[in-house]
Structures are given as C-alpha cells and as structure tokens.
Amino acid sequence: MQVTLLGFGGGTPEGATVEAWDAIEDAEILIGAMRLLDALPENDDQRRFAAVGAEEIAALLTQEAAERACVIFSGDTGFYSGAKTLLPLLRERGFDCRVLPGISSVQLLAARLGRAWQDWTLCSAHGADCDPIAAIMRGKPAFFLTGGVNTPATLCAALTAAGLGETRVTVGENLAYSKETITSLTAAEAAKQSYAPLSVLLTEAVPRPDIPAGGLADEDFVRGSVPMTKREVRAAIRSHLGVRRGDTIWDVGAGTGSVSVELALTADEGAVYAVERDKEALALIEENRRRFGAWNLRVVRGAAPEALRELPAPDAVFIGGSGGNLRGIVDAALTKNPDARLCMTAIALETLLAALEVFRDLDAEITQISVSRAKAAGELHLLMANNPVFLIAAKRRETT
C-alpha cells in the first residue's frame, strides 16, 4: 500500500496543494480528524476513518486492504505535525510512504501581516509544555501554536507576570476560516481576553543584551549597599557550574542579583530562581533583572531552605549566602536532584571549613581566586587587592 501523508493549510481544503488534491481523489482510504474529513466532497468509492493517533492510524492501515491511502493533517506536515510520529511507524511496518507539505499557520499569519517569518522563534504550546519566557529570551519575535490549556491568554499572562505586559502581541484566530480574526494588542490586554480554540500567537521581539565571555561590567549593575560578587568571580562561578542553555538554576542568597542575571542570560532557554530574604537586596535583584532583560530570572522571597521547597528540581545551584543553613540548602537541592551541580563562595575561613564538612561525602573541588585592580596614584598605578575568594564546586561522587 502506498500511503500519502499530506497537509491541509489552515486545516481547510482550500489550503491544500494541487498535488495533495490529486492524491486525495486517487485514494481508496482517507484518514484524519473528523473536521478535516467533513470538509471534503462526498465520494462513495472511498472509505473514510476519523483518527488522529499514530498507533490508531497505523493499525487501521494494517487492517484495511487498499493500494492507495491518504492521511490528512492540518497545516504543514513538517511543522509540529503528527506526521513526524506516524511516518517512521509506517515505514517500520513496510508501507510505501510519501509526504506532501501544506501551508502552515505561521505562513498564514505572516502573509496576513505582510511580514517575513524566517527570523521568528517557532514554538508549539499545543498540548505541550511551553515556556513563553524562554522563547522570547532569544531576542526575536516568537510564534506560538496554542491549544488545550495553553491559550494566547495564558501565555500572555505568563509574559505579564514576568514584567512584559507592555510587549506587543498579535493573535490570529481561525486562520483561513470564514470567522478569521487577527488582533494586535499588548500582552497584558491579551491576558484578559478569550480566544477561539484554533488560535496562534505572535509576540514581538524583546531586546536583551548578549553576555560577554568575561561577564558584564560591575559598574553596570545597581548595587546600593548590598555586597556584590565581582566580575572575575562571576565568570569562575559560571565555569564551575557548567551552565547550559536549558538549565534550571537556583541562586541562593542572591544579593544584588549580579550572579543571577549572568546565569539567566547564559541559561536563556532555562530558568533561574534567585532566593533572597533581604528587602533591599530583593529590590536590587528586580531592578537589575529589568536592566539586563533577564526575564527568565524569577525572584523568590524568603529564607533558605524553607523557600526552596516549592522550586523545581535544579540542574545547578549557586550558594552565595546560606544564613548558617548550608547543610539544609545542600540537602534540599540534592533531594530534588541528586545529580545537581553545586558551587558556593567563601571569604571567611570559617565558611570554608563549614563547606568542607557539608561537602565531605561529595566530589568537591576548591579554587582560590585573588583579584587585584590597578588604581592611579599620581603618575603611578598601584594594584589594589580585593579579598581572596574560595570557590567550592561539588557534585555527587561517582561510584565504581
């Protein structure tokens, strides 16, 4: 049996290519969602089956005898389509398969707006977990397929909660259908609206700086009277934590948020949780978060380890301040993820000794950093030393 997987652009027959129509007219079996089958002209010579699951479709094709069959998908077969799952399944069972593309909803919206879409970030929130903050962190317009609990309103509510309520968004409802509607407004306004089940969302680009290899300049941060980790130490922290773009990271005792901001800009497809109890420091974290566009930085008010209970499992944890609760913080992190990568700083020898005791059963590495900066003294320049800083990086000890 030859099986053709094809796309209906916008979910309507008018969006199918001539080649797709030839395949439909020549097929003995048609399979697809009921709304797609109902849109086709009647044909008594064809057997039609309403099905959307890959296993169900494969079982139908295995049971039914025919030479030619078509499986119809909404939109484009290469853009978040069920064809991705079905195609290898059919080929494993020996079916002769071909794929015909359709017009995707991203193409439809871009055409309606008269815009190119090759630089958009493309995401699916249709029945899938989706973090709109991670998507906009790339600094480009972001397009979202929506569906189920992830509606344009819920995605825009997440943007608004992150401080991006003034971001311009466009919602396309029922694209290619008679009730098509396209609305442009702010994310805060969109969060209060209701939208059709067949909707897509486009958010405009939110500018954000790229973090230099050596880190952001100290003087660019707002710090007030709160102690701040210096640039050279921040770079070492990022290196010891081995930060990856999709990591979930805790910064416990975040202070001004200088480490949190750099971690957030590095893990721009993940999330950073800055845990802090001091009111002045909390305000500084919020200000530095906005200043650098670190929208994936979430501020957690409270003292650790209590404030860590509701946080997601971390891939990496930086401990800038423990308030005397280091063991509780480490236990909380490793309970949620035994493979979490840990790093903490210490200036006082007593803090270093306490860390060694807590990390006794872990694979720990200690580094000491001394930084001196030149300062003019008349015609001469003298090196002014900062306090030496110990970095203790730790992870679960490998067992043999």
Image: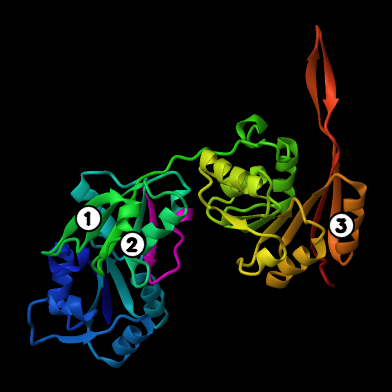
The residue type indicated by label 1 comes to: Leu
Q: Which mark is residue 355?
A: 3
Where's residue 386, x and y in %?
Answer: 83, 32
Q: CA distance from mark 2 to mark 3?
A: 46 Å
Is residue 97 found inside the magenta-colored segment of the image? no
Residue sitting nearer the eye, 230 or 120: 230
Name, please, the residue furthest toward the top.
Answer: 379
Eyeballing the image, is 88 above or below 273?
Answer: below
Q: Position of residue 316 (x, y in %)?
A: 68, 58
Give whichever of discs 1 and 3 has the lower sequence position: 1
Where the N terminus falls, by quadrant? bottom left
Comparing 92 with 49, the one in front is 49
Q: Which residues are magenta?
A: 120-134
**Looking at the image, is mark 1 or mark 3 nearer the viewer?**
3
Residue at screen point 38% across, 55% down? 122
The residue singled out by tag 2 in the image is 153
